[in-house]
Image (spheres, rainbow, N blue to C red):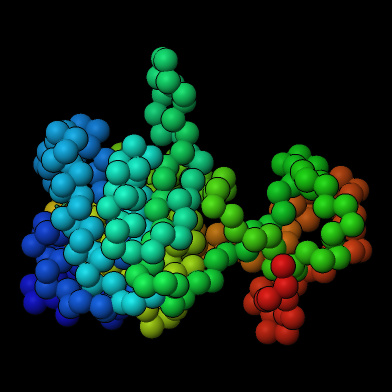
């Protein structure tokens, strides 16, 4: 695929320690199912790779457009491009992408990322742009989410009234506002200062836009969250990063991430989480008989197409 030598390789993936602008031209056109990018945000941060993270605004946009153009080129027809950035940058870059791809969603991911700024609204979401090459996605299976319940008693936060019997047993439809992605805070899962994305986010994106034989590309590897998620989900992957040390040590020992992902999977594609069911039992709140519960792993689950 890419003619350079990878610094790290598994049966599924290859990681190149280089400037992505040098490596991307080696990826053949129309071969990638999901191209994801989480670039530096031009906030003047210090990276171990020593990059300049305080460019002039127009220089930053120009730089982003150069690797985004490559990502567009390598996408298969029907392939998905996801771009994670601050709303300010995605406003401009979304315009650029919509001239080349088909817009699907601006996904708002509710995570606070800086302190309140006087005279401005408190910045509390990242923007995840979702585009596809051509008119529609080749692959689209969004997660279903459990009903939101009270953290104390396990009772439903929203009243589903007479609709309980019509709820999909695999959970609620995923919307374009994601409020259930926790920031990476837990020391055990925190790989580097402030840049590692949550594994849950990458699991959701990769599960939505790829199947087992698919190829995932991420030109800004950082701590390797995308590659770890792809590896654990059995997807092929291509990675690029100027300083691969953290990603390599993480890929070398996947046990913690495997355990973390298994916990994430316990609570997706089901109508109620185990924890909420236990809370209800403790608080004597039996579940309405109008709900149908199914385990997402159950082959007999009849509910995949019901909304
Ligand atoms: C925001 S971080 C990515 C974090 C990653 N998503 C994770 O979960 O750990 C951006 C990364 O891009 C890398 N980077 C910056 N410029 C690059 C370039 N031209 N080519 C490859 N990597 C680059 C930086 O070293 C940094 O690790």
| Residue at 24% over, 44% down | 40
| Residue at 72% over, 67% down | 307
Placement of 298 over or under 99, stated as above or below: below
| Residue at 55% over, 59% down | 264
The reply to whether residue 248 is visible in this rendering is no
| Residue at 80% over, 42% down | 153
Furthest residue in direction front, as rendered: 99
Front in this rendered view, residue 170 or 190: 170
User: Is residue 141 found left or right of 75 in the rendered image?
Assistant: right
Residue 33, x across and y down, in percent: 35, 74
User: Is residue 89 found left or right of 299 in the rendered image?
Assistant: left
Front in this rendered view, residue 62 or 247: 62
Residue 287, x across and y down, in percent: 87, 57
Front in this rendered view, residue 109 or 7: 109
Placement of 178 over or under 237, stated as above or below: above
The reply to whether residue 288 is visible in this rendering is yes
Can you say which quadrant of the picture contains the N terminus?
bottom left
Residue 10, picture quadrant:
bottom left
């Amino acid at each position: 695929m890419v003619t350079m030598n990878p610094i790290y390789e598994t049966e599924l993936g290859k990681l190149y320690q280089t400037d992505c602008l040098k490596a991307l031209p080696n990826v053949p056109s129309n071969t990638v199912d999901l191209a994801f990018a989480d670039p530096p945000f031009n906030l003047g941060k210090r990276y171990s790779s020593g990059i300049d993270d305080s460019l002039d605004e127009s220089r930053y946009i120009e730089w982003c457009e150069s690797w985004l153009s490559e990502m567009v080129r390598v996408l298969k027809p029907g392939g998905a491009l996801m771009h994670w950035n601050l709303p300010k940058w995605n406003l401009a870059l979304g315009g650029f992408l919509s001239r080349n791809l088909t817009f699907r969603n601006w996904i708002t991911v509710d995570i606070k990322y800086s302190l309140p700024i006087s005279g401005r609204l408190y910045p509390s979401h990242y923007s995840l742009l979702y585009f596809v090459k051509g008119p529609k996605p080749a692959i689209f299976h969004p997660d279903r989410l459990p009903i939101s319940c009270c953290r104390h008693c396990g009772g439903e936060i929203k009243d589903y009234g007479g609709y309980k019997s019509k709820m999909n047993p695999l959970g609620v439809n995923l919307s374009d506002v994601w409020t259930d992605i926790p920031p990476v805070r837990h020391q055990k899962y925190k790989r580097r200062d402030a840049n590692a994305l949550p594994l849950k986010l990458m699991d959701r994106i990769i599960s939505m836009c790829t199947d087992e034989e698919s190829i995932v590309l991420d030109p800004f590897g950082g701590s390797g969250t995308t590659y770890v998620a792809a590896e654990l989900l059995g997807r092929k992957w291509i990675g690029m990063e100027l300083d691969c040390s953290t990603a390599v040590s993480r890929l070398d020992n996947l046990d913690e991430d495997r355990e973390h992902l298994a916990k994430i999977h316990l609570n997706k594609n089901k109508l109620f989480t185990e924890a909420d069911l236990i809370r209800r039992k403790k608080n004597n709140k039996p579940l309405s008989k109008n709900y149908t519960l199914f385990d997402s792993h159950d082959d007999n689950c009849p509910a995949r197409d019901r909304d």
